[in-house]
Every structure is written in C-alpha cells, then in structure tokens.
Image: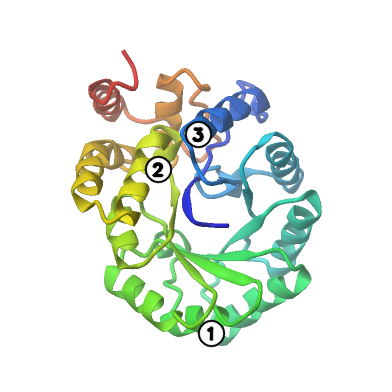
Amino acid sequence: MFEGVLPALVTPFLNDGSIDTKSFNDILKHVEEGGVSGVVVCGTTGESATLTTAEHKELIGFCIENATVPVVAGTGSNNTLEAVELTKHAADAGADGALIISPYYIKPNNEGLIAHFKKIAESSDIPIILYNVPSRTGQDMPLEVIVELSKVDNIVAVKEASGDLSKLSQIIEETGDEDFAVLSGEDGLTLPTFAMGGVGVISVVANIVPGKMVKLTEAVNKGDLTTARKIHFEMAPLIRSLFSETNPIPVKRAVELLGLSSGSMRLPLAPLSEKKSYVLENVLRDMGCIE
C-alpha cells in the first residue's frame, strides 16, 4: 500500500487564514495526474502543528472524499491521548493509513516511545507509519525502538528522515523478517534509499514535479540506474531550493508560482525571502514548470 511516491501535501490558506479547500483539491489533482501512489494529508508539510483539531479532522475528511489514491493521514502528537483521538478519527473517516511523528519536545526514553506508539496502534487497526524526523522533534528515534515497533501487527512502515543512510540501511537489514516497509523521508535521498531496499518516499518535491519523482522510483525499481541518476540530478536544484528555508516555506511559494494556490502560511512561518524566491523561480523556469 505504501510503495512508490506519496506527496506530503501542502495546506493552502485563504487570505482570512481559513483552509482553502478548492486550492487543496487543485493540488491533489495535480499530484494524482503525475501518477503518485498515494498522498499524505496533515503532515509537517501541511503545517499540521498550526491546524486546530477541528481543522485537522475536516481536512482529512475532505481529502478522503476527493482523492482517487490511498490517503495517509498525519495524526501524530506529543500528547499520546490526542494522537489516539486523531488516529481513531482518521480510521473512522476511511483513511488508508496514519503517519505518526515521534513525540516532539518531550524526548521520552525508549520505553516511553514504545508505549506511546503501541497505545496508538491498539486504538485502531489502521496501518501505521512511524515518522522519525529528529530535526523537528529534537530526538532521533533509536534503531532498537524502530525494530521493536516493527513487530507490532499494524505498525507497517517507517518514514526515515534522519538523513543517516547507515542507520537507514540497518533498519532495512534488521526488519527484513517483518512485514515492514522503509520509506524515504528526504527527497534528496530517495535514490539511495530505493537502491538499498526502501520501497517508497513521502515527498515534498512531488507537490511540484510528481511525475519526475514517480519516474525516478520506477527507474530504480527496474534496475535502470542510469535513468534514475539522470532524474535525480535533474531534480537536485529544485530539492535544494525547496529546502533553502524551513519546509514548507519554499514549497508554499512554489505552488503559488505554479498557480495552484496562494502562498499564504500561518505564523510563526513567514514568506520566503526575495532572494531565495528569485532562485526558486529560476529553477522552476529552467525545469519547464513555469514560463
């Protein structure tokens, strides 16, 4: 279910700060036309931390109603009970999976991490993807915790965004006996992740060039590394530009340049600097994304 390319969708906002569901649907159709395998709604790229619980539930429901591909709902929290509530709602709404970030700010010990995820997994039979992103949480989920959680029936994958390819390799090695998938959480490391046995990517760049990321993953799966490398380097300038400031600041500007939505964000995020916006615009023009 979680193989291939799953864009981490941005959440567009209207000028009054409310969610722009029309633009969200435009972005959804844009990525679906690119051939993606599924989508992730209310993840980090979707500014989930600034969405109210009601908005979170509303957007997940809207995405499920309008998507033609599987939907993974971001339902994580540093509050276990809130994560349970959001995950149960996503399951009841018909989501195909839940992406759950490790608890940020709190920095629990290994026993706490394991108990947190097991509590959420026990609340519903929805397939769960662990999300390890230490740059956001302040804590790198230990290998032994991921391996232990891979044994839980409905914990089926990890989105690994530590940037540590050695660790990623060891996760694949040590979970090989489980029905457990490893997904790239960093666009720039998609090629090596797939080459080592990863099966999917939860992608920011796929909001903009979904077809290219799909072609890269298809090429590497066929063993066509020449084509995969070519596409990897074609996307490299865009990936660098999309992470030139905190995600999703640059990608919000990129979808605006594509005419898919406004670039509005919620505080404390602020718009992309003029200099970096100029670079991004030129990259998009060079790639043929805009005129």
Q: Examine the image and state in which quarter residue 120 appears.
A: bottom right
Q: Secondary structure at mark 1?
A: helix
Q: Tell me, yes or no, whether the two marked residues, 2 and 3, touch with CB atoms within 8 Å.
A: no
The numbered mark at residue 148 is 1
Residue 289, by quadrant, is top left
CA separation in Å, label 2 and label 3: 10 Å
Q: Is residue 75 visible?
A: no
In the rendered image, the residue lying farthest to the right is: 92
21 vs 94, left or right, is: left
- In the picture as drawn, the residue positioned furthest to the front comes out as 222
Disc 1 marks which amino acid? Glu
Residue nearer the viewer, 277 or 120: 120
Residue bearing mark 2:
214
Neighbourhood count class around disc 3 (C-alpha, 10 Å): few under 14, some 14–19, many 20 upward = many
Which label belongs to residue 31? 3
Q: CA distance from mark 1 to mark 2?
A: 31 Å
Graded by Cα atoms within 10 Å as few (under 14), some (14 to 19) or many (20 or more), the crowding at tag 1 reads few
Q: Secondary structure at mark 2?
A: helix
Who comes first in sequence, dot 1 or dot 2?
Answer: 1
Mark 2 Cα within 10 Å, few/some/many (few <14, many 20+)? many
x and y percent of residue 89 in the render?
78, 55
Name the residue located 71 percent from the left edge and 76 percent from the top edge. 119
Q: Is residue 247 above or below residue 272?
A: below
